[in-house]
Image (spheres, rainbow, N blue to C red):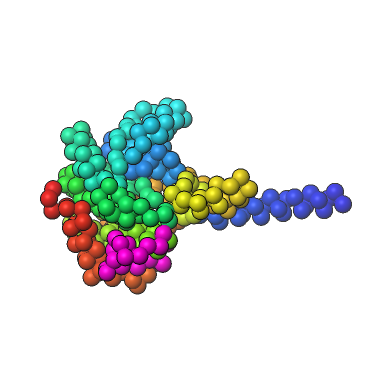
């Protein structure tokens, strides 16, 4: 009887451990360094972004946390310094829901830093009730895509001057369920929070692919990443639906079924650091492996259309 109980416990423990290994997914196990490199990460005060910042700091990078909340970003900075004993990590204010804030941030950053080796467009909102950015964009399109579109383009000259350099855009598996609504890109005629989220994540992939074409031969490479289903604060933007994720009975289950933020950061680290990807650009990765895009996501004409529309919406030509 006792033996059967022990065997049962061992089987359950091994099954749980195997399940966790599968859930955590691919891991970037190389010890690649980034000594002396200047790294900018948006939305890095929590979750995947914070873990990415911590790891890149440990590998020798000079890391900037570009966040809307200076208070939360400074808290994250102090935590990372306390844990690593390293201090070359800096906080700057950036609100991706404001084109004015983006331009102000870029002006300050370019005056402060002579190089930029790695830009990680990590920040995002997910399936939130309808809201508009300060410039009148639907929030998910505005923050997830348009904000990063403008930020990246305004930093391109510095990235080119620092080549070889990289741009990593956090997308999602949800992009496969998205469509670019050419008749109502800004969701002015109708709005569905999930559909809008999927559209914004598809926009991240299309931006990555179009950007790779425009950067060919410059030494700047770009990658789209699906981090996996991760236990982070991202659902906090979902209004009343957040209750389902944050409930005291549900939260422990999510921690068992979802990736940890550190595991969620692995594909970001892979695309940011792995030397084997130095000649790759414009591709989509998950679990530290290249993934197949949907036929819709590979539509070059639509990607070009989205780029042109994004240029107009952000007034990019008026640099």
Locate residue 296, reporting x and y percent: 33, 71
Asked if the stretch drawn in magenta spans residue 181, the answer is: yes
Q: Residue furthest bottom?
A: 295
> Eyeballing the image, is 180 above or below 264?
below
Seen at 37% across and 70% down, the residue is: 294
Choose between 233 and 132: the one closer to the eye.
132
Kindly tell me whether residue 289 is visible in this rendering.
Answer: no
The kind of secondary structure the magenta stretch mainly shows is loop
Q: Residue furthest left?
A: 318
Specify the segment rendered in magenta.
Answer: 174-193
Seen at 22% across and 43% down, the residue is: 100
Locate residue 138, reporting x and y percent: 32, 56
Locate residue 309, reporting x and y percent: 21, 61
Kindly tell me whether residue 181 is visible in this rendering.
Answer: yes
Locate residue 92, reporting x and y percent: 29, 35
Left or right of 120 in this view: 237 = right
> Eyeballing the image, is 297 above or below 14?
below
Seen at 36% across and 27% down, the residue is: 87
**Residue 115 image-quadrant placement:** top left
Choose between 287 and 297: the one closer to the eye.
297
């Amino acid at each position: 009887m006792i033996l059967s109980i022990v065997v049962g416990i061992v089987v359950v423990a091994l099954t749980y451990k195997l399940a966790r290994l599968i859930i955590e997914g691919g891991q970037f196990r190389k010890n690649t360094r980034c000594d002396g490199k200047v790294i900018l990460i948006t939305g890095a005060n929590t979750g995947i972004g914070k873990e990415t910042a911590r790891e890149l700091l440990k590998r020798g990078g000079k890391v900037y946390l570009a966040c809307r909340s200076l208070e939360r970003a400074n808290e994250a900075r102090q935590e990372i310094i306390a844990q690593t004993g390293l201090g070359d990590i800096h906080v700057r204010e950036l609100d991706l829901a404001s084109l004015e804030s983006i331009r102000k941030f870029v002006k300050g950053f370019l005056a402060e830093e002579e190089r930029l080796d790695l830009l990680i467009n990590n920040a995002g909102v997910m399936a939130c009730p309808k809201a508009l950015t300060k410039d009148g964009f639907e929030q998910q399109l505005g923050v997830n895509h348009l904000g990063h579109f403008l930020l990246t383009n305004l930093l391109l000259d510095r990235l080119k001057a620092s080549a070889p350099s990289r741009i990593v855009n956090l997308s999602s598996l949800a992009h496969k369920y998205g469509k670019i609504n050419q008749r109502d890109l800004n969701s002015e005629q109708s709005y569905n929070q999930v559909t809008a989220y999927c559209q914004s994540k598809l926009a991240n992939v299309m931006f990555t692919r179009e950007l790779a074409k425009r950067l060919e031969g410059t030494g700047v490479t770009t990658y789209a990443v699906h981090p996996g289903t991760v236990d982070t604060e991202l659902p906090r933007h979902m209004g009343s639906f957040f209750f389902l994720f944050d409930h005291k009975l549900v939260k422990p289950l999510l921690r068992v079924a979802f990736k940890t933020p550190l595991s969620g950061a692995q594909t970001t680290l892979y695309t940011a650091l792995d030397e084997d990807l130095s000649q790759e650009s414009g591709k989509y990765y998950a679990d530290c492996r290249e993934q197949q895009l949907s036929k819709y996501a590979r539509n070059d004409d639509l990607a070009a259309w989205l780029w042109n529309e994004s240029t107009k919406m952000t007034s990019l030509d008026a640099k």
